Amino acid sequence: MSALSDNLVTFAILAYLVAMIGHAVEYALGNARTRIAVAAPVRELVGAGGGVVPMPPAPAPVPSTAADRSAGRARLAGLIGVGATAVAALLHLAALVTRGLAADRMPWGNMYEFVLTVTFIGVAAWLVVLWKRPSLRKLGLFLTLVMVLLVATAELVLYVPIVPLVPALNSYWFIIHVSTIVFASGIFLLGVVPAVGFLMRNGYEQGKRSFPYILAKRLPGAVGLERLTFALHAFAFPIFTFAVIAGAIWAEAAWGRPWGWDPKETWAFISWVVYAGYLHARATPSVKRNVATWIAVLGFLTVLMNLFGVNIFFTGLHSYGGLD
């Protein structure tokens, strides 16, 4: 089962790569629209003798142009990207399930498994969003790019063999706390994609044509991206709040104190404050939307710091989640 899980992760990375290429092709081909001439209405002329003289029949539709064919290829590439993303998500899920079966526990006992689970939640949430709002498909390029980078990093850098849980994790709070923190982190991961997209698209709509704003030329409108950013963060924040509280309760049971400013606890608190600041700024009319969105991006950077930086560079009571 362990070897099968490893192979499934490799196949998932390849599928994410195919999806990214498909979305990149659609993105490169642009927004060409099929252009077919509309039949002109038939007009009638009334002759001197009262007879009706019909006008010649309307011209036949104009044959498909190069732009039309390009639009068709772009749509096909985009659909391939979506299909490959769905296949990758299934492979990703199968890798987690087989890893859990091999370990005889939930598959998030170390940094490698945690990253795999967070990225799966992110891509699963993306497929749900895409099902409800197909017009956001062009965001798939950036989402799959993130998936390729993070899942490949997990497989190539963070991988560790399956080992039993350390005694501190043998508790039902392991499922309650870690599952909620994983779920919230996965939604935050997805949320940063439209956040960055909004910042680029908003600049493009304001006339900026330098890098990276020019990359947003074919993204959906800035207003829609900003609203999606807010919706995802508003959904994830209460779950993240519960996860932090559950962690404090677990710490009281395991270590005899609810909070000790352990490095991971400290950065979890920093993330909570930053995301709370984003939601407050978003609800304040005097704060510009791009300023609020920058706070959301900063929030995700603190999540990355908590996930990678703390586990690698700091030692604390959560060190069992690192690379060993």
Image (tube, rainbow, N blue to C red):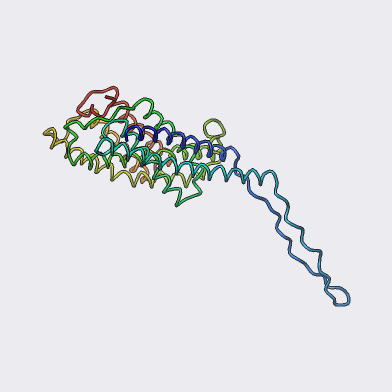
**Residue at the image position 26 percent from the left and 33 percent from the top:** 109
Q: Does 47 sit left or right of 6 as displayed?
A: right
Residue 91 sits in quarter = top left
Closest to the observer: 38 or 172?
172
Query: Among all residues in the image, which is located at the extreme left?
Result: 256
Closest to the observer: 301 or 82?
82
**Residue at the image position 26 percent from the left and 24 percent from the top:** 324
**Residue at the image position 31 percent from the left and 42 percent from the top:** 183
Residue 318 sits in quarter = top left
Residue 186 sits in quarter = top left
Q: Where is residue 246 in the image (x, y as percent from the top left)?
A: 20, 41
Q: Does 28 sit left or right of 103 as displayed?
A: right
Query: Among all residues in the image, which is located at the extreme right?
Result: 49
Answer yes or no: is residue 292 visible.
no
Total number of numbered discs in the rendering? 0
Q: Position of residue 238 (x, y in %)?
A: 28, 45
Answer yes or no: is residue 83 visible.
yes
Q: Quadrant of the N terminus?
A: top left
Closest to the observer: 162 or 238?
162
Closest to the observer: 182 or 158?
158
Q: Where is residue 120 in the image (x, y as percent from the top left)?
A: 37, 40
Q: Position of residue 107 (x, y in %)?
A: 28, 37
